[in-house]
Amino acid sequence: MNLMRTSRSLLLCMAVMAVSFMSCDDTTDTIGTSLIDNMDKLSVFADTFNVTSRTIESGPVVARNTIGYLGKVKDPETGATVTANYMVQFHTLEGFTLPAEDNIISRKDGEIVADSCDIRLYYSSCYGDSLAQMKLNVDELDHPVEEDAASYQSDFDPEKNGYLRENGVKISRSYTLADLTEKDSIRNLSTFQPRIRIRLNKPYTDKNGVTYNNYGTYLLRKYYENPENFRNSWKLIHNVMPGFYFKITNGIGSMAYISTSQINIFFRYKNDSTTSVGTTSFTGTEEVLQTTTFSNDGGRLKQLAADNTCTYLKTPAGLFTEVTLPIDEIVNGHENDSINTAKLTLTRLNNLSASKYELPAPTTLLILPEDSLKSFFAQDKIADYQTSFLSFFSSESNHNIYLFNNISGLVNAMIKARRNGEISANWNKAVVVPVTTTYTTDAYGTSTLTTVTHDMSMTNTRLVGGSANPNQAIKLSVIYSKFNSK
């Protein structure tokens, strides 16, 4: 019996592989006959169905990314604008220490001071014009945004939620990403990292009413008052430095993708018999919370979603594509057959604009049941290739498509729900969502998918589809099989 089952499984795999090299025409019903004898005949069938689609607004989404975003841009393809404001907390190493208090040379009236202090927002990449004139406000937080990433969505606004300190750090600064205020000799160095730099050298008054000549002096003196508050990030955030919020107040044209945030304190200290320049830094890392508040042009998004001649994928927190799978048609006449493969192809339409600042297409898409869209990201799930699947796109490829090679698990789950009467209004609908993925690689070189999060970068593309689709219909190719014993 076990040998027979193994043989059948092997034959079924051979049949499916054979079909993959054949066109989907009426001759596929003879494949089973050609592979096995009449004692145990395998029948394989192929069919193709049209799939309908539409654009839906994503609304706020769970934002669980390690990249921060800051800027305001307008998509030349769609005319939609997006603004990104950034909140960051700072991390300290366990057991953090500074030089002995008596060794600090930087002093004023006998008290320790910082020579200077600044915040640097290092960006790994950017979108738009690096010479675009932007303006931002920097505000100190009054109290920490607690670490509960699942509850913070893309529209979470620290200012509206009362996190900004009324009499804390308040700085207004104009900047360009090219930062022409920096010397060419520095910007041309191979080690130079592009950044937005905010100096914190004005007088600062803490919550106890004590005034310091700058924010760095406040941090130094707080350390020497109680070094324990700098021993771990929780103590630092709750007792000394809750964090900062950076808000775009004017300008349009650039978006910085912030990979590292750093607050730096500069001072002089005695090192043996010499004077050394000391720098201590606290960095925004994955160990502490950072959030981005995204604001989209809601009116323009509604107009795009209403365009029924195509569908859209737009990030961050913009537009998704919903597909309705023709489950009733797929099942009709195949009630006793198994569905082995179901291939869905989504074709990308070329951009209409020719701007050098046109947004790139999303590189990775996730398809999953619409009913599980919110829970998937809230519960930090990954694609299981049973009901959720990934597709990858490369602009260097000759094929302008996103291919979901086999979503049979998703189709079978919908069929099961239909048969069991466990259907909702969206029971046969799936959503296509741009995502960002991360992988870990073990010692043997094996990569494992570890996270799937909403893509919060600037992307946009149009897909073939919509209720008034002028192009060829979206196709779902299905292969069935069944055993006929005689």
Image (tube, helix red, strand yellow):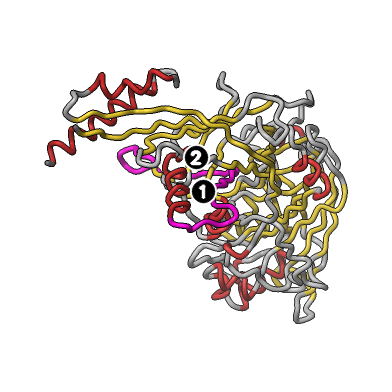
Residue at the (81%, 43%) spot, across then down: 303
- The segment highlighted magenta reads 420-447
Q: Could you say which quadrant of the image residue 170 lies in?
A: bottom right
Q: Quadrant of the C terminus?
A: top left
Q: Which residue is mark 2?
A: 390
Kind of element beneath mark 2: strand
Residue 59, label in figure: none
Of residues 465 and 336, the one drawn nearer to the viewer in this rendering: 336
Q: Is residue 413 left or right of residue 137?
A: left
Does the magenta run of residues contain 92? no
Disc 1 residue crowd, few under 14, some 14–19, many 20+, Cα 10 Å: many
Task: Relative to 72, say whether 265 is above or below.
Answer: below
Q: Are marks 1 and 2 in contact (CB under 8 Å)?
A: yes
Q: Amino acid at mark 1?
A: Val
Q: Could you say which quadrant of the image residue 190 lies in?
A: top right
Task: Relative to 279, say whether 129 is above or below.
Answer: above
Q: Which residue is mark 1?
A: 452
Task: Relative to 190, say whether 251 is above or below.
Answer: below
Residue at the (23%, 31%) spot, across then down: 10
Kind of element beneath mark 1: strand
Of residues 388 and 82, the one drawn nearer to the viewer in this rendering: 388
Of residues 168 and 429, the one drawn nearer to the viewer in this rendering: 429
Of residues 160 and 1, the one drawn nearer to the viewer in this rendering: 1
Gap between marks 1 and 2 measured at Cα = 10 Å
